[in-house]
Image: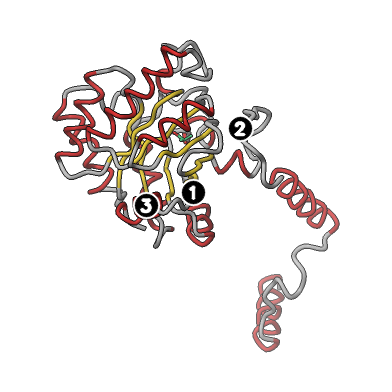
Amino acid sequence: MTIPELLRRTERGEKLTMLTAYDLPVARLLDEAGVDVVLVGDSLGMVALGYSATVPVTMEEMLHHCKAVRRGVTRALVVGDMPFMSFNIAVKETVRNAGRFLKEAGCDAVKVEGGQGSEESLQAVQAIVQAGIPVLGHLGLTPQTAGRLGGFKVQGKTAETAVKLLESALELESAGCFGVVLECVPTLVAQEISRRLKIPTFGIGAGPHCDGQVLVTHDLLNLTGSFHPKFARAFARLDREILSALSKFKKAVKQGTFPSAAESTAMDPEQAKRFKESLRGERE
Ligand code: KIV
């Protein structure tokens, strides 16, 4: 998958798909399933590392997981999420951090949260793009700055904030983003943004009219515990499947039915005889 191909598909009205991965097995499955974009999101922090927010996630953690995902993907576009305070700092440092995703982790692009009316965010995006690094924007609910937005809430609900979102999306397009994630935005607002932008929009909790849809894979598989945002449809109940397999393992071990003879290694009879003889010799 390439960025020009994503744009061609958007022009043809073909819906795009993006899902998150943090490790090799999931990355391999997403690639095999034909998902267009594999996002190593900083949701890593909450979903896989047990943090209560995405803010503590570090560059080193992101790069570590991006490298694992890269090894599992041969076809899809791999996008690494820039963690909190790795951008919107000195421009030189921002560009250096973005570059590490490509140089060290083999990502194809980076994602940057924010830009809602912020000159610094736009400058950061422009500088990264100018350095030859493709950037995916992210507007609406931006978890890294959820506190400033009043929590994990739908953004752009009033006419004024909706217009601001639309303007920000157009600015990100002009700054050179190849696509924009729209998170938790009313359907009408996401529809209008998608209509006006040439680059694809990827919606999450943003209704059906975006050019593509993105979800956290662990949500889709019901592996994130008790928190279920309404937009995160569980397409499978892997938690149940996994629990059932784990209790079957436990039962088999306790009953002595695992491992079976076929799952174990028998010794060559001659060697077994000699081994037993040497044990006898030891005792005498
Ligand atoms: O971090 C993440 O996984 C994301 C997606 C939810 C878009 O930003």
Tell me if mark 3 has few (under 14), some (14-19) or many (20+) residues whose alpha carbon lies within 10 angstroms of its own: many
Q: Amino acid at mark 1?
A: Thr
Tell me what residue is drawn at x 28 percent, y 34 percent.
173
Q: Measure the alpha-carbon separation of dots 3 and 2.
A: 24 Å
| Secondary element at image label 1 | strand
Residue highlighted by disc 1: 17
| Number of the front mark, 3 or 2 | 3
Q: Earlier in the sequence, mark 3 or mark 1?
A: 3
Q: Measure the alpha-carbon separation of dots 3 and 1.
A: 10 Å
Nearest the viewer among 99 and 256 is: 99
Q: Amino acid at mark 2?
A: Phe
Q: Amino acid at mark 3?
A: Leu
| Secondary element at image label 2 | loop
Q: Position of residue 256 (x, y in %)?
A: 82, 60
Residue highlighted by disc 2: 231
Nearest the viewer among 238 and 203 is: 203
Q: Earlier in the sequence, mark 3 or mark 2?
A: 3
211 relative to 47 in the view: left or right = left
Image vertical order of residue 246 relative to residue 272, above or below: above
Residue highlighted by disc 3: 6
| Secondary element at image label 3 | helix
Tell me if mark 1 has few (under 14), some (14-19) or many (20+) residues whose alpha carbon lies within 10 angstroms of its own: some
User: Would the CB of label 3 be found within 8 Å of ligand 1?
Assistant: no
Please name the colour scheme applied to the rendered image: secondary structure
Q: Which residue is at the far right?
A: 255
